[in-house]
Amino acid sequence: MKKPVFTDTHCHLAEPILRCRLPEIVAQAAEQGVAQFIVPAITPNDWQTLLAWQTQPEIHALALGVHPWFCETYSPQSHADLAQHLHDNPSLWVGEIGLDFHHTELREPQMAVFQQQLDLAKQYSRPIIAHNVKSLDTFTQIIKQKRFKCGGIAHAFSGSLEQAKILIQMGFKIGIGTLLLNPNAKKTRAAAQFLPIEHLLIETDSPFWRGSNQATPVLLAQIAQELANLRGMDLADLAAILAENLAEM
């Protein structure tokens, strides 16, 4: 019987700990039914690596951007480069971008950099991969102010059912990640269980997991099985629905 096939919709394969053994990691993931990947950048240093992967068959999408933790690496030159890359490469997304108010000292620069990158995503009609931690009100306010309608993925969702519905109304799919494997993450597990399934995607955020850099996309198989269990679904049916959800983007 053919194994269900999944896409890891958020994995940082350009991180050195994964990049140095990428063929092995891709092969191991494929054995577990994880056949494709969406790979976002963290800083501009990742961009050329990702651009070189555009023709790889296992790549579903690549996203260029600057993570809010590293907003200070985003310069006027970065902005110009990102605009040029989006112009030259119609399949590129924008990400990982957003806000993380756990780092309060970066609040203002994060907001400025997020808005600049969002402007480019809007200009070139690209979905975003959104990082949103302790910042939902400000995040949604900026999305509304910018009249951004291109949607994207709300990466590593960790909120409540009600918060997820707000993001869905703004055109985002909800990225369910490793938090689903934590039995104490009751709000997030409830969102994964009860949200309309047509709004869900799954991801690993590898290599980052539980404070380490040891995760790989192989972990997606556990996330998929846990989501299927929560929703009382057959794994193959779940795979088909998630593939349809991703195709809508």
Image: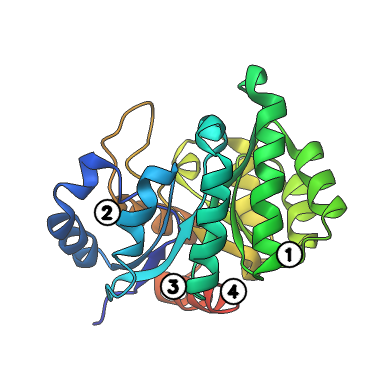
Q: Residues within 10 Å of mark 3 (few under 14, many from 20)?
A: many
Percent from the top left, x then y, of residue 125?
66, 71
The amino acid sitting under disc 4 is Met
Q: Earlier in the sequence, mark 2 or mark 3?
A: 2
Query: Which residue is denoted by mark 2 in the rendering?
Result: 218
Seen from the viewer's position, the closer of residues 194 and 110 is 110
Query: Which residue is denoted by mark 4 in the rendering?
Result: 249
Residue 175 seen by the camera: yes
Q: Earlier in the sequence, mark 3 or mark 4?
A: 3
The amino acid sitting under disc 2 is Val
> How far is the residue under mark 2 from the one under mark 4?
24 Å
Query: Which residue is denoted by mark 1 in the rendering?
Result: 171
Q: Earlier in the sequence, mark 2 or mark 4?
A: 2
Q: Earlier in the sequence, mark 2 or mark 1?
A: 1
Query: Which residue is denoted by mark 3 in the rendering?
Result: 239
Is the residue 239 above or below the residue 66 in the image?
A: below
Seen from the viewer's position, the closer of residues 159 and 248 is 248
Callout 1: SS = loop
Percent from the top left, x then y, of residue 84?
52, 63
From the image, state whether disc 2 or disc 4 is nearer to you: 4
Q: Residues within 10 Å of mark 1 (few under 14, many from 20)?
A: some
From the image, state whether disc 2 or disc 1 is nearer to you: 1
Residue 23 occupies quadrant: bottom left
From the image, state whether disc 1 or disc 3 is nearer to you: 1
Is the residue 94 above or below the residue 211 in the image?
A: below
